[in-house]
Image (spheres, grey):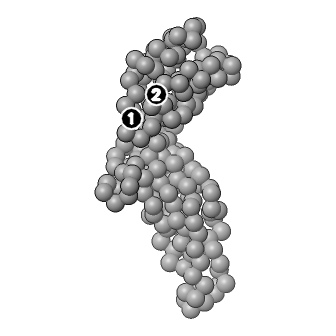
Amino acid sequence: MQHKCKVTVIDKKCFAEYQEQYLADPNSGVCPFYNVGDEFIFERYGGEDTFWRTGNGTQCGEAWDCISRYIYTALQGGSIMRNWTNDERMMIACCNDGTRPVIFKIQRLDFKVVKIQGIGCESCAGNIREALEKVPGVDRVEVRTDKGWAEVFVDKDRDVSDELLKSAVEQRGGYIVTGIE
């Protein structure tokens, strides 16, 4: 099983009374860096590593200081917050700006990499995606034609066997599964 981490901005707050009382610019307002609904995906597989260097500049340094440990835990496949949230693969956290905090939902995304010989075009990708999405327990599928694999995201608390995934792909004809990680 491999892991990605999805970070979603779910809220922004502004404490104008604190800004007025304590800041050099009493009208600073809400955080200008993030917007509600912003999503960021972090991954560390197949030569990709978007975790280091503050998410390659996609994150404010103050926020990164607060959320990076949860992202790192998710990328390693660990429990982000066992017995605190209703899903140990998820955490709600905020940046440490006391006058204009941003609230984040941080989710571990579990997936299997199905390496496939014979993916040549977007039509092939659609064919493979359709086959894999029919396997019970599969939530969604992203086919990476540039890498020669499919990322199969599984439902929470479901175990999808490698044999079912392999069979689904190879029954479509013309494709050979060369490995599953």
Which numbered dot is residue 136? 2
- Earlier-in-chain disc, 2 versus 1: 2
User: Which quadrant does the N terminus fall into?
Assistant: top left
Toward the top, the furthest residue is 174
Which of these two is toward me, 52 or 149?
149
Q: Position of residue 129 (x, y in %)?
A: 59, 25
The vertical placement of 130 against 63, above or below, is: above
From what the image shows, is residue 142 above or below residue 43?
Answer: above
Q: Is residue 56 visible?
A: no
* Amino acid carrying mark 1 in the image: Arg
Residue at 52%, 53% in the rendered image: 7
Give 116 or 172, whichever is nearer the viewer. Answer: 172
Q: Secondary structure at mark 2?
A: loop
Give the residue displayed 64% in from the left and 23% down from the top.
Answer: 126
Q: How many residues crowd mark 2 within 10 Å: few (<14), some (14–19), many (20+)?
A: some
Residue 16 image-quadrant placement: bottom right
